[in-house]
Amino acid sequence: MSQGCGWRSSRWLIATSITIALFSETFLYGFIVPILPYMIEKRLSLDQSRTQPLSAALLAVHGFFALISAPIIAHFADKSPNRKVPLLIALAGCFTGTLLIALTHSLWALFLGRILQGITGSASWVVGFALLMESVAAKDLGATMGVAMSFVTAGVISGPMISGVLLQLLGYWLTWSVPLTVLIIDVIARLIMLEPRDLKPSSSSSSASSTESRHYIDPDETTNLLSSDQLPRKNSSSRGFYRIMLQEPRVIPGFANALWYSLLMATFNSSLPVHLRLVFGWGSLPTGMVFFCLQIPTILLAGVFGWLRDRFGLKVPTTVGWLCSAPLLWFLGIPGNNSFPWASSDTNGKPIFIGCVIAFGVVSMLVHGAGFIQLTYVVRDKQAQDPYIFGPHGGSSRVFSMIDVACSLGMMVGPLVSSLLLETVGFYYMNIVFAMTCLAMAGISFIWFDGKPIPLASHLSFESEN
């Protein structure tokens, strides 16, 4: 093994590199939120009445193009023996889109930059999570995903927090230096990283081949799994990945959980800056601090909640998380509402609102990532029964394309739905609608989610998913 290959291909470095990539993608999604009013009204010289609909459209277009590109990216990623190159290409596109957004004085270029961010962010999400899943032991999946999800959420929430604070304190261009710096760190991490596939012994060596066979497939199963009459069936079944997955009853509830959590987070991004300016008169700095309050529980508690999932399963924590989210969302709509004078902006409205935001950040950790893990359970179960059911390189990228589709759909629909509800019924009743949907998600999770700890029965090593 060449010098440095050991630590460059270690699980901790791969997990760190992918976590940085996932953080970068979600950080860039929300970073633009507090800056949009300034960009639309000052740099583009458009009327203030267009700020809310254009903000919603710019957030939605990111989700839309991520949605349509994810399955295509995943299809080719699962056919590729190397995941590092697609990650670097995605980074280059993301850097270009971010620079275009920062420099533009035209609306069409602003939308083009968001489209580039959406497509390349989808590539980072799909390929990055697949590589992460392939590099972590099954028994550590919940905790690792919990930490990764904490950085994903940290990116979603810290993006608007940091940009809101820096815009008011340091100005426009110094604010944009932050995401560009994050992208530079991202590319350095990806260049250093070596994925395990890069270190596989040559197939020309008989001893290496036999060792690799023992590593990937249990010898007792070799005859049954790799008999010549079965290989054509397995290769053909690999072309029906989505058909196989959608026939599994656990998949749709997991997809729905990922979608609805993403939708709620996108709703916060699109509605809070305008709502807080109207109700409390807050600018970008205090609005950014609200997003920081939403992020604090994620940073502190993600590993704990991941450990709980590993030990006690998904059903109870996810159900409790959705049940607790419902009253908190309702209560978030009360401060500043004229029907509740005891929670007006001049009395107790501001501390009540901040308290609800922090509490929601805590209970949302019971929900965050549950859909991701649910779909991962399904893929692991299928590949434990048949290692080649999804093809020679497994189905890691395609399962995360399903997750990315769910999240992208939420990011696309959330701003549009929240904008529509804000204009028609207002912030208070919008939150009541979302609270009711949380109760529905609690019922779905209780019925369909796995109540057992993470399944470890697979006789295949984790790397066999390759």
Image (cartoon, rainbow, N blue to C red):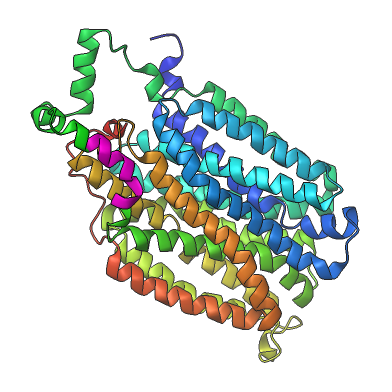
Q: Is residue 457 left or right of residue 368?
A: left
- Name the residue rendered at 55%, 27% in the picture: 190
Q: Nearer the viewer, residue 339 or 249?
A: 249
Quadrant of residue 224 in the image? top left
Residue 387 visible, this angle: no
Residue 240 colored in magenta in the image? yes
- Name the residue rendered at 55%, 37% in the picture: 20
Residue 351 spot, x, y in % from top left: 66, 74
Q: How many marks?
A: 0
Residue span colored magenta: 234-244
In this rendering, the answer to whether 378 lies above or below 331 is above
The C terminus, quarter of image:
top left
Query: What secondary structure characterizes most of the magenta part?
Result: helix
Q: Is residue 332 left or right of residue 441?
A: right
Q: Is residue 228 left or right of residue 287?
A: left
Residue 456 visible, this angle: yes
- Name the residue rendered at 66%, 90% in the picture: 340
Residue 259 spot, x, y in % from top left: 48, 61
The N terminus, quarter of image:
top left
Residue 458 spot, x, y in % from top left: 19, 41
Quadrant of residue 408 in the image? bottom right
Residue 466 colored in magenta in the image? no
Q: Nearer the viewer, residue 116 or 304?
A: 116
- Name the residue rendered at 23%, 27% in the picture: 216
Residue 36 spot, x, y in % from top left: 78, 57
In this rendering, the answer to whether 283 lies above or below 383 is below
Q: Is residue 27 left or right of residue 463?
A: right
